[in-house]
Image (cartoon, grey):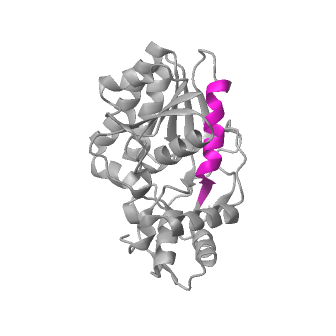
Amino acid sequence: MRFLVTGATGYLGWRTTVVLRERGHAVVALARPGAKERAAAQGLDAVECDAGDPQARAHVEGCDAVLHFAGVPDPARSRADPARAVRENAGTTLNLLEGCAEHDALLVYPSTARDAADPYAISKRLGERACELHPARSAIVRLASVFGPGQVSWEGATGAIAAFAARAIDGRPITIPGDPRRTRDFLYVDDLIDGLELLPVKQKGSDPPDVLYAGSGVDTPLEDAARLVVETVGSGVPIELTGGELPPGENDSHPLPPDAPRLELAARPLHEAVASYVDWLRLHPAAQGRARA
């Protein structure tokens, strides 16, 4: 199959591009001009074009599906600039839907399983609404806490496991503000890609878009995840539970709805996923520096 992957120099876009190419698929990697350079993304041979630029629609031609990872990927940046989050998460989606309608491709829209009414979740839900209203074929995938190769805290990536691993490798204390027993459903990125790879085959008709949840089905307290990371790294760093108030939605657990439709995938156990991720991090050039988070 042939895929267009947006946000290809970011964590999810980069890993998806690499894995799908390794599996023999043709992948057009699209990256925003001036995007932050990441060590792993060197040599990716990406096309520089903003996903919200009308010219991006031409790159959909000949593709079976667009995997749309471009956007503002985290709550903190969305709170700081809500209008930009809406443009990057919803506006770019509408632009690509136009391209998919023109070239008969499937748009796969990775959304969030967060149900907090914060700027990030709202901007992602607006992207979902664009998929629901537009005649182009689309599939909405609400993601749990995805982690793995390509997610590098030293390079500014967010995510609990990434932050824990960077600090453990770097020999710095791990801090968990708020409620340390709040849970996250952690999913290894390669397991997510297994499910995304099959969507163009499964979603052939013009029915309303599927809304699927992608996760492991296991809710893990952040404190337990931190201890697993420390054990896996073989580090003696302390885990500091600092408490305090957090922005709305950040101190909540976000379990996946038990009866909601799921993306078909086989999620590996968390201890195996963390071990694979730590092994990758230790080989990554950014791991030779010092953690900045």
Q: At which x and y percent is residue 27?
A: 51, 34
Q: At which x and y percent is residue 161?
A: 54, 64
Q: What residue is at 36 percent from the left and 55 percent from the top? A: 76
Residue 20 seen: yes
Q: What residue is at 65 percent from the left and 42 percent from the top? A: 194
The number of numbered badges drawn on the structure is 0
Task: Check the image and report above or below for 166 versus 25.
Answer: below
Q: Give the range drawn in magenta.
A: 184-201
Task: Check the image and report above or below for 53 versus 69.
Answer: above
Residue 182 seen: no
In this rendering, position of residue 121 left or right of residue 87: right
Quadrant the C terminus occupies: bottom left
Quadrant the N terminus occupies: top right
Asked if the magenta segment contains residue 69, the reply would be no
In this rendering, position of residue 191 left or right of residue 178: right
Q: At which x and y percent is residue 190?
A: 62, 49
Q: What residue is at 44 percent from the left and 25 percent from the top? A: 130
Magenta stretch: dominant SS?
Answer: helix
Task: Check the image and report above or below for 120 versus 247.
Answer: above
Closest to the observer, 288 or 150: 288
Q: At which x and y percent is residue 237?
A: 52, 84
Which of the 4 image quadrants contains residue 19? Answer: top right
Q: What residue is at 41 percent from the left and 20 percent from the top? A: 99
